[in-house]
Image: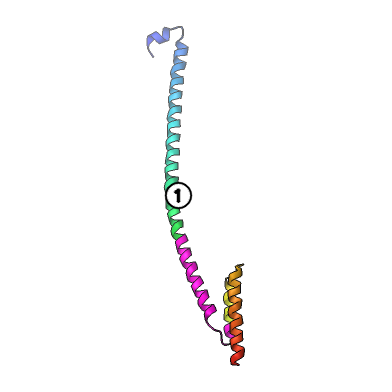
Amino acid sequence: MGKAARRSPDARLLRLEAKFNAASDRWNAATDRTAKLEEELEERLRSLRSRLMSRIAKAEKKEENRAAAFSRALDKVMKTRAKTIEGLAVKVRVRERDYCDDEDLEITILRSLVDDIKAMSRSG
């Protein structure tokens, strides 16, 4: 601050203005920093979301493949004729292992058991 500012009747206001401007500059810098961090957060979230969505899609595909393999394995069990009570028990345990409320699946399992029992009674 020059000698003229010290001699001015508004010297105090001029000093306060300088302090105000410095405070304003610091606040603006802090606001800019906050905005920059918010942008960085958004970018990282977009990137993370993209990576996670990709991983989820892969996991869902794997889940679909595993579900199809499960279905094929269940189908093989139910299409294989049981010849003893032990064989019937295998089918019951398979049903209990992954019980669900799928009516069509329940009918398939029941038909398989009934067909096995019928075949066992004819051969015995």
Tell me the amino acid under the disc marked 1.
Arg
Quadrant of image for the N terminus: top left
- Residue at 61% over, 69% down: 103
User: Please, what is the dominant secondary structure of the magenta stretch?
Assistant: helix
Picture coordinates of residue 82 (x, y %)? 56, 84
In this rendering, position of residue 96 left or right of residue 5:
right
Q: Is residue 82 visible?
A: yes
- Whether residue 82 is in magenta: the answer is yes
Number of marks in picture: 1
Depth check, front residue: 84 or 53: 84
| Displayed quadrant of residue 101 | bottom right
Picture coordinates of residue 8 (x, y %)? 43, 7
- Residue at 47% over, 13% down: 13
The answer to whether 122 is drawn above or below residue 59 in the figure is below
Q: Is residue 92 visible?
A: no
Picture coordinates of residue 5 (x, y %)? 41, 10
Q: What stretch is highlighted in magenta?
A: 60-87
- Residue at 43% over, 25% down: 25
- Residue at 47% over, 71% down: 69
Picture coordinates of residue 16 (x, y %)? 47, 16
> To which residue does mark 1 refer?
49
- Whether residue 56 is in magenta: the answer is no
Furthest-bottom residue in this view: 124
| Displayed quadrant of residue 108 | bottom right
The answer to whether 75 is drawn above or below residue 16 in the figure is below
Depth check, front residue: 5 or 71: 71
The image's colouring method is: rainbow
- Quick one: label 1, few (<14), some, or many (20+) residues within 10 Å? few
